[in-house]
Image: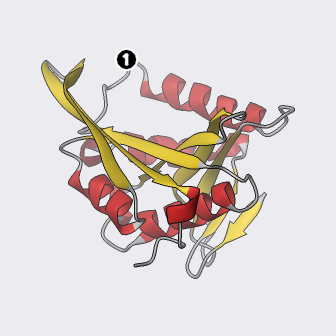
Amino acid sequence: MRIETERLLLREFESTDWQAMLAYWNDERYQRFYEEPKDQEAAVRELLDRFVVSQTEEPRRMWQLAITDPRSGRLIGNCGIRVKNPVHREANTGWELDPNVWGHGYATEAARAILGFGFGELGMHRVWAECNAENVRSVRVMERLGMRREAHFRKHQWFRGRWWDTLIYAILDHEWSGGRE
């Protein structure tokens, strides 16, 4: 599967993508909002293997795509949609980017494309996303997409020696307009 946007190419992951993913996972700016695994390389390889295996599952319920720069072919992140309840047509979404490309609107562009796929081709009724409450960049992306905050879980996750709050945002099919206001 491939989704082309104005500036990006979202494509299926390949097993060789782990090195590019590991490079941004190792950046302390990226790691700020995540519990750091003991073995970063093993964690990235395991996650990437799950992404590749999901491409052949029937029925397919996860589309986690590599975000690439089509001019250079460089992997700059990933985004996806995961069907959580096919009967209720509910899915969650998420994205991550190499911190070296933050601030250029790529997360919004990729997330808009994956939501369009979710509401269009997959026929989802509701799509939700979760983020660390201090991750203001992700909050802004969700708000730009027209998602609404539904929950604020106080002191919800323990890592890096402290409790962190979590936010849940969601959007319904009849609210989706391509993420533009």
Q: Residue at left 47%, top 44%?
A: 128
**Quadrant including the N terminus:** bottom right
**Residue 56: image x %, image y %?**
85, 36
Callout 1 secondary element: loop
Q: Residue furthest front?
A: 174
| Of residues 12 and 93, the one drawn nearer to the viewer in this rendering | 93
The answer to whether residue 113 shows anywhere in this view is: yes
**Residue 89: image x %, image y %?**
66, 41
The answer to whether residue 74 shows anywhere in this view is: no
Q: Residue at left 43%, top 20%?
A: 39
Tell me which corner region of the image, top left, top right, bottom left or bottom right, holds residue 168: top left
Give the labeled residue for mark 1: 38
Tell me which corner region of the image, top left, top right, bottom left or bottom right, holds residue 131: top left
Q: Residue at left 72%, top 33%?
A: 87
Q: Which residue lies furthest to the left in this view?
A: 162
**Residue 15: image x %, image y %?**
71, 40
**Quadrant including the C terminus:** bottom left
Q: In this view, does 127 lie to the left or right of 15?
A: left
